[in-house]
């Protein structure tokens, strides 16, 4: 059986409503934060233009990277837990250990679960990116500091990738110790 078949099977049987609820809440808060920041930047820019009497004004519109990463870790941790762990007798046990006696390829199952985790992380990151850029474009218009936002999202992406790698490595290490 190919990894893609395991991926489709795992995706079909994944029931993690907590992840989707946290994702929706996180994206909603990102929208509120982006709208408030863009509105405040517009007011500050208008006040600066009036005071200086010029057409140029500095825009203060930034991504709160700490809050973005905090929401990311909370949301992705729930997805990671749903993918890689089950509760048995009050303890979290790696799901991979359940497949030890079945005639399946454990590496392919782990790879499929890792792809689902990467998919969830990508949805979170791209959703946040779309929300911030659309809020900046709609509220600030042509004066939106898109390069500054892109740079901040680049830093956030580096952290997101590192966090997903750490989660996958700890899951892999923990599943190896149960074997």
Image (tube, grey):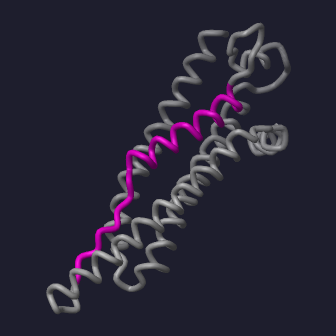
Q: Nearer the viewer, residue 21 or 121?
A: 21
Q: Is residue 162 above or below residue 104?
A: below
Left or right, residue 6 beside residue 116: right
x and y percent of residue 120 in the render?
63, 47
Q: Is residue 99 above or below residue 66?
A: above
Instruction: Tell me where residue 125 appears, x and y as whole percent.
Output: 53, 54
Instruction: Please tell me which residue is depicted at 46% across the width and 41% down the height of the picture.
Output: 70
Judge by depth and name the residue closer to the eye, 58 or 105: 58
Q: Residue at x 16, y 92 (%)?
A: 53
Number of numbered discs present?
0
User: Which image quarter is the C terminus in?
Assistant: top right
* Residue furthest to the left: 52
- Span highlighted in magenta in the image: 57-84
Q: Is residue 147 magenta?
A: no
Query: Would residue 58 be counted in the magenta stretch?
Result: yes
> Residue 65 in the image: x percent, y percent?
38, 50
Left or right of 56: which side holds 172? right
Name the residue at 54% across, 55% down: 29
Percent x, y for residue 14?
79, 38
Quarter occupied by the N terminus: top right
In front of the other: 18 or 161: 18
* Figure quadrant of residue 94: top right
Asked if 162 appears above or below 128 in the picture, the reply is: above
Residue depicted at 28% across the width and 79% down the height: 45
Q: Judge by depth and name the residue closer to the eye, 52 or 100.
A: 52
Q: Main secondary structure of the magenta part?
A: helix
**Left or right for 19, reference 50:** right
């Amino acid at each position: 059986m190919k990894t893609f078949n395991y991926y489709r099977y795992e995706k079909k049987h994944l029931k993690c409503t907590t992840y989707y609820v946290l994702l929706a809440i996180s994206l909603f808060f990102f929208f509120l934060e982006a709208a408030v920041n863009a509105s405040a930047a517009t007011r500050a820019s208008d006040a600066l233009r009036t005071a200086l009497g010029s057409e140029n004004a500095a825009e203060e519109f930034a991504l709160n990277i700490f809050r973005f990463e905090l929401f990311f870790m909370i949301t992705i941790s729930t997805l990671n837990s749903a993918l890689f762990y089950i509760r048995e007798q009050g303890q979290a046990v790696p799901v991979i250990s359940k497949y030890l006696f079945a005639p399946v390829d454990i590496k392919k199952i782990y790879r499929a679960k890792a792809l689902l985790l990467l998919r969830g992380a990508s949805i979170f990151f791209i959703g946040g990116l779309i929300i911030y850029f659309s809020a900046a474009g709609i509220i600030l218009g042509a004066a939106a500091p898109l390069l500054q936002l892109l740079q901040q999202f680049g830093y956030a992406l580096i952290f997101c990738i590192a966090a997903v790698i750490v989660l996958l490595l700890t899951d892999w290490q923990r599943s190896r110790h149960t074997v």
